[in-house]
Amino acid sequence: MGISSYLLQCILPVIENAIGIERNKVDRMAEQSRDRIPDESASREEVAEFWDTHDITDYLDELEPVNVRFSDRIDHGIIVTFKSKVFNKLFEMADERGVFPDVLIHEWVAKGMKEAQATAPDSRKTAISSTE
């Protein structure tokens, strides 16, 4: 069973009871002409603007299943500040690769550390992988 079916079977009755909408009204709303959900080519800003002005309950019939992976845990974090130009370029580059900026930064730091280890004296080398 896909997530769309799951949502319709499990969540829709809760929504109907909570706000008093009958099933036939939900079906009529789904059939009415409405704005299309932005596709993958839309920018983050366009998607944000869309959902700022639309209600997801009007689009339950269009939801599609997705595969989700959760990481075990994040051990540590650090705050890094950037000048606006660098910050904007970082988001642009991450968006082009289809990843979040923190993933891109992590890859760059891991790569830089690996390169630094390759040139460090033997006594200072410690094993680090790009997945750490």
Image (cartoon, rainbow, N blue to C red):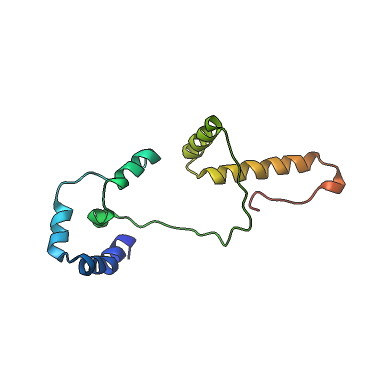
Q: Quadrant of residue 29?
A: bottom left
Residue depicted at 18% across the width and 54% down the height? 30
Task: Using the rendered image of the protein, determine whether residue 93 is visible from the camera's viewpoint.
Answer: yes
Q: As drawn, is 33 to the left or to the right of 51?
A: left
Residue depicted at 38% across the width and 39% down the height? 45
Comparing 75 with 114, the one in front is 75
Q: Quadrant of residue 58?
A: bottom left
Task: Using the rendered image of the protein, determine whether residue 39 is visible from the camera's viewpoint.
Answer: no
Count of all numbered marks drawn on residues in the image: 0
Q: Provide residue 94's location: percent of width, then percent of height.
A: 51, 39
Q: Provide residue 59's location: percent of width, then percent of height.
A: 25, 53
Q: Provide residue 75's location: percent of width, then percent of height.
A: 63, 58
Is residue 29 depicted above or below 8 in this figure?
above
Residue depicted at 56% across the width and 46% down the height? 103
Residue depicted at 32% across the width and 42% down the height? 49
Q: As drawn, is 44 to the left or to the right of 75?
A: left
Is residue 50 depicted above or below 69 in this figure?
above
Q: Provide residue 68's location: percent of width, then percent of height.
A: 45, 58
Q: As drawn, is 29 to the left or to the right of 128?
A: left
Is residue 92 depicted above or below 19 in this figure?
above
